Amino acid sequence: MKKFIAVSLMIFVAFLPEVLMAHPGHGGHEGGYTIIHYFVEPMHAVVTIGCIVAVIAFVRYSRKKVQQ
């Protein structure tokens, strides 16, 4: 089961750049690139936070299932 979780997370991370598509204005941030951009821009924040919640829910569900 641990291997399945690890492979699932690797696949998720591999496709993350495809999910967080660029929008007009990328690259023109004052002060350079920061990861904070993905949490404060609504276009990215919805997807980023949704993906984080999905991964946490999946991991918690998997751990509960293993404990039973």
Image: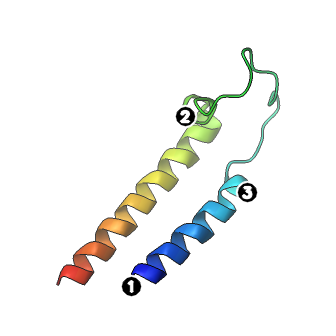
- Find residue 45 and report its image quarter: top right
Q: In this figure, which colouring scheme has been used for the structure?
A: rainbow
Between circles 1 and 3, the one closer to the viewer is 1
* Residue ID for mark 1: 1
Does 43 sit above or below residue 36?
below
Q: Nearer the viewer, residue 43 or 29?
A: 29
CA–CA distance in space, label 2 to label 1 = 31 Å
CA–CA distance in space, label 1 to label 3 = 27 Å
What amino acid type should be assigned to the residue bearing mark 3? Glu
| Residue 18 tag number | 3
Does 14 sit above or below residue 52?
below
Q: Residues within 10 Å of mark 3 (few under 14, many from 20)?
A: few
Q: Give the position of the C terminus as an image quadrant.
A: bottom left
- Find residue 1 and report its image quarter: bottom left
* Residue ID for mark 2: 39
What amino acid type should be assigned to the residue bearing mark 2? Phe
Direction from residue 3 to residue 59 in the image, left or right: left
Residue in the image at 25% along x and 81% along y: 65
CA–CA distance in space, label 2 to label 3 = 16 Å
Q: Residues within 10 Å of mark 1 (few under 14, many from 20)?
A: few
Q: In the image, residue 55 lies at what x, y percent? A: 44, 61
Q: In the image, residue 2 lies at what x, y percent? A: 40, 79
Direction from residue 51 to residue 43 in the image, left or right: right
Q: In the structure shown, which secondary structural element does the residue marked by tag 2 occupy?
A: helix
